[in-house]
Image (cartoon, rainbow, N blue to C red):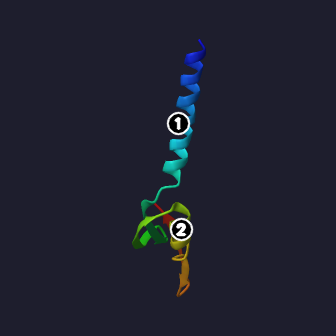
Amino acid sequence: MKPMRKIIKASLLLAATGAVFFASCKKEYHCQCSYNNKVMLNKDLGFEYKSDASTQCTNYDSTVAGEVWNCMLY
């Protein structure tokens, strides 16, 4: 019974480590900005960490000639 518990604990630890690893990896992100439900800009952000890509996409939010662009990461 004890060896089975060790195997389960080791498996859970490995799964948790893998989840942290994949969450912190760079992934390919894109930014889409819209105004009045019409897409105004699609931007390829390349391979970034999610926090960096989110910051970069948020920088595209703007007000141009009274138009408020809402940008979101995908």
Q: Which mark is residue 71?
A: none
Which is more N-terminal, label 2 or label 1?
1
Which of the image's four quarters has the N terminus? Answer: top right
Badge 1 local density, few (<14 within 10 Å), some, or many (20+)?
few
Residue at 59% over, 20% down: 5
Q: Please report contact status of discs 1 and 2: CB closer than 8 Å, yes or no.
A: no
Q: Residue at x 48, y 49 (%)?
A: 22
Q: Nearer the viewer, residue 68 or 57?
A: 57
Q: Is residue 32 left or right of residue 62?
A: left
Where's residue 31, x and y in %?
A: 45, 68
Give the SS element for disc 1: helix
Q: Which residue is at 56% across, 64% downward?
A: 51
Q: Amino acid at mark 1?
A: Leu
Residue lying farthest bottom? 65
Instruction: Tell me which amino acid carries mark 2.
Output: Asp
Q: Nearer the viewer, mark 1 or mark 2?
A: 1
Q: Residue furthest top?
A: 1
Residue with the mark numbered 2: 52
